[in-house]
Image (cartoon, coloured by chain):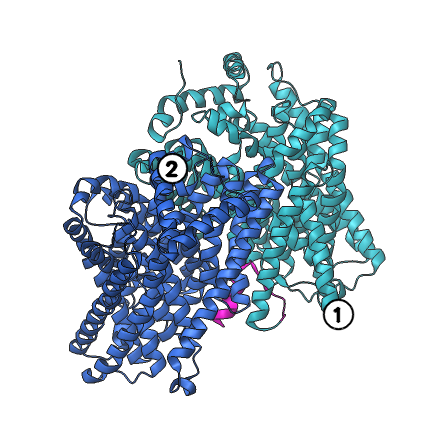
Chain colours: A cyan, B blue
Amino acid sequence: MAWWWWDEAVVVAAAGGTGGSSGTVVSICVFTAVLCLCLVVGHLLEESKWVNQSITALLIGCVVGAIIFLLNKGKKSRILRFDEQLFFIYVLPQIIFNAGFQVKKKQFFHNFLTIMSFGILGVFISVAIVSTGCCWLFPKLGFGDLDAIDYLALGAIFSSTDTVRTLQVISQDETPRLYSLVFGEGVVNDAASVVLFNAIKNLDINRLIGGVALKVISDFLYLFFTSTMLGVTIGLSTAYALKALYFGRHSTDREVALMALMAYLSYMLAELVDLSGILTVFFCGIVMSHYAWHNVTESSRITTRHIFATMSFIAETFIFLYVGMDALDIDKWRTSETSFKTSVGIFGIIMSLVLLGRAAFVFPLSILSNYMSGSCERAPITFKHQVVIWWAGLMRGAVSIALAYNQFTFSGVTLDPVHATIITSTISVVFFTTLVFGFLTRPVVSAMLPQHQHQQQSTAAASGGGGSTGSNSPKDDDFFTLPFLSPEEEASGSSSGRGFLQAKRSISMLLERPVHTVHIYWRKFDNKFMRPIFGGPLPLSP
Amino acid sequence: MAWWWWDEAVVVAAAGGTGGSSGTVVSICVFTAVLCLCLVVGHLLEESKWVNQSITALLIGCVVGAIIFLLNKGKKSRILRFDEQLFFIYVLPQIIFNAGFQVKKKQFFHNFLTIMSFGILGVFISVAIVSTGCCWLFPKLGFGDLDAIDYLALGAIFSSTDTVRTLQVISQDETPRLYSLVFGEGVVNDAASVVLFNAIKNLDINRLIGGVALKVISDFLYLFFTSTMLGVTIGLSTAYALKALYFGRHSTDREVALMALMAYLSYMLAELVDLSGILTVFFCGIVMSHYAWHNVTESSRITTRHIFATMSFIAETFIFLYVGMDALDIDKWRTSETSFKTSVGIFGIIMSLVLLGRAAFVFPLSILSNYMSGSCERAPITFKHQVVIWWAGLMRGAVSIALAYNQFTFSGVTLDPVHATIITSTISVVFFTTLVFGFLTRPVVSAMLPQHQHQQQSTAAASGGGGSTGSNSPKDDDFFTLPFLSPEEEASGSSSGRGFLQAKRSISMLLERPVHTVHIYWRKFDNKFMRPIFGGPLPLSP
């Protein structure tokens, strides 16, 4: 019924049966109101060293869930039904596009290989470990008649990280490289785990015996490169249109509208041709912020920066709030018939596999990367930094939930006890990691990076933006004082001194490892050909 | 099926049967792409004296519709099905909220009574004339076994105006009063016609005989005042929260998110308690821009201004584009079995009633208003201005379409030939008024306001924002050069000279008509009590 479905559409979820259309409107009102409450409370708790937006949303979600639970006399605790389809169409693209849009490109491309190895190889390793681990240990608990696909899916679900919390306590001025490694891995990991998850879902169960790994990897690589190309193409065409037509002359609104629509178009086009919309929209975001962003009016720059950040901020808060409310949904706990002991066992297994699976690639790959950089004067990734990187990726978040729902429920509902158990375990893991690890993050980081002690307050404040967007809030002033400063320069600290340092460093690197040579050549090419065509600040002096 | 309905939700409409989910994705891609095309073309045609965004969207919609029509070998011409439910939930609130948010409040409240009489009395008069006219003339054409409700609905449908086009060619610096009258009437009219339409729908057919008018009016007034109060309350609480908590200290994103969410919450709350969400969100917008807007960071101000404008801009373009594509939908034309002659007759009747119904209140009410203002030194509404006001409201737009669909179709489809005829007539009227009157607007205004001749180019450029948002684009620079300037001052031309003039004028008006006395007292009260609590610039000197 029409009235029903537009309501269901409104909040990426639908009324949990409060009954009738008015019930749905009630749900939406409650949810919107609680979302506002989250913003206010999260803002008030900003000073505290311990919590952040995600934790606030989770806890508030729990409380609201409990209240609803009591109001309904224990019958139900949630007013919204999760629809992971809507999540993947509405919510995730915003988060990913914003991640690409806000990424500090200079650092990102500087550490490109390291980030990619963490983000992609890392996911593969982690998936392999988690999958095999579950496949080997679950039966020992007498749990789970899951098939291979399910186990692989489990691997993907628990390999997608949520690095927001750590980003809020690392100072990107003191340790720019560490920051960009954590941030970069975070976004690449988001994309990679989703793409890998889809590749796994598309596996033909019958051909699993032979060359499954190969199939997955080839699918993955194909998806990765084609999607990237599509995203870059659309991003460049947007940049060119904005530059050639000079929209700003007439209207800021038109510029903003065009950028937003093109971003969404890139996502839908990718989905249309069965590519990964996530990757496409991510690289579309990178290209847009690298070229298109420089072709628009000052107002448009500020507006786009903030609106994409805000949308992704709302999206993330929404998810954690939902997970919080959903945690008390007794239906699921009831459906899963596993004993408390077994549940704890499963939880323990998954947690240890998560810890292990992450350690299994962070430390080796860091060492490899250090070796690669070799004599290059870039600071190597110290062991303490490796620990921070390892820790940063232990949190599990929205993507894990969405993937779990996607694999083990049909639009939020499952009647299979085993699947219900996996959902509940996923929720528990997300809860535990977000809350406990979230609380511990600041102490851990302080222990590993002592010089951060005095920094924390300011950093916490700076990261108020929440989500992967926090990193841009402190730059607001730069937008005003240095309106024509390119994000690259901002990335390296907005000080010409650093800028010069960067240049000097670049020259030295030119004689160094291939990666950097490539990077240098790219930048030459970028300055000489790309920027004149697609926009962007030109180097002051050759 | 889940995949289906989220797609349907994505674009306020659904696949017209290209078949299957991929078909839906195709529709979305095509529509998004065409939307982008509209932006670009509309931008390129900006210089032309003749067209504007709406006209561009209409024409492009037609062309695309024709292409699809041919591609489908004449079977169908549209890829989207209109769902007016989604229109009222997603699209209209954005447009109305933005209208309230961008309204130039000083002028608006200065001319409050005149605007209200135009917007509300005007709608009533126009509805009465159109309804009775149709009720009397349709049967003469041997058309229509419509019941009383349908005729009243027709009145409401053809009483909602679309003043965008005229606003783009009136200079608000040369004729601020005229501008604010046209703009103000436009937004009040939007709200009034929707509210009246709903009041009519809720009429009990049986009690129609006795006191129908009274019932409608009382319902209307009840809705109007309660909804207004709700909107003001929510707007004020948002302002207070923003001021008391000083969100900007931590994050711009949070401020923007809170404002957007509260605006949407106001709409949903109103719907929840069966009030008019439109009116609520409109006054919520006014209050937010009057108080809340002053409590946020500079970035937030720019972001909110532009993002609300952009959303409403996209929404309006979307509608006109849709109408354009829908015009060629042969199903409707086929369903309506009326002969060409009859159709033309109906079209002629409606058009003449629209012209008459508008003339019937613009000129009398203007004269009344002039008499009311009497010796007040404010310029009276000259006859030429009256003609401009009359002309400005002749265009019919998105709201008419949406109301027509809402009354005469079930989620975009109708099998009743009579209803189909009314839909097609509505589309014809919207087309004719938007295109023909739209083209003629500039000449007409030039003829009435000769001093505009030299102004037009700049004004056209200024109004590039499209929709009711155009008026804020030219203020972009003010936001930078005079960041702490209140919209009121901007409204009166951003020059302290004018400001002083305003003050002097106010004093004189204090001894004048009651309206202005009220206005003055209100401003005193505002400066003394409201602004200190809820935010906003305080007067420099008593």
The quadrant where residue B156 appears: bottom left
What element does badge 2 sit on? helix
Residue A290 located left or right of residue A440: left
Instruction: Find disc 2 in the rendering and name its residue.
Output: B476
What kind of residue is marked 2? Asp
Please tell me if label 2 and label 1 are on a single chain. Answer: no
Image location (x, y in percent) of residue B151: 31, 78
- Location of residue B532 with respect to A287 vertically, above or below: below
**Is residue B345 rendered magenta in the image?**
no
**What is the residue that sits farthest to the front in this orientation?**
B511
Foreground label between 2 and 1: 2
Image location (x, y in percent) of residue A424: 73, 57
Q: CA distance from mark 2 to mark 1?
A: 54 Å
Q: Chain of mark 2?
A: B
Counting every numbered tag in the picture gives: 2
What is the span of residues highlighted in magenta in the rendered image?
A1-18
**Is residue A8 rendered magenta in the image?**
yes
Image location (x, y in percent) of residue B268: 53, 62
Q: Residue at x 72, y 66 (%)?
A: A331
Circle 1 residues within 10 Å: few <14, some 14–19, many ≥20? few
- Location of residue A76 with respect to A477 vertically, above or below: below
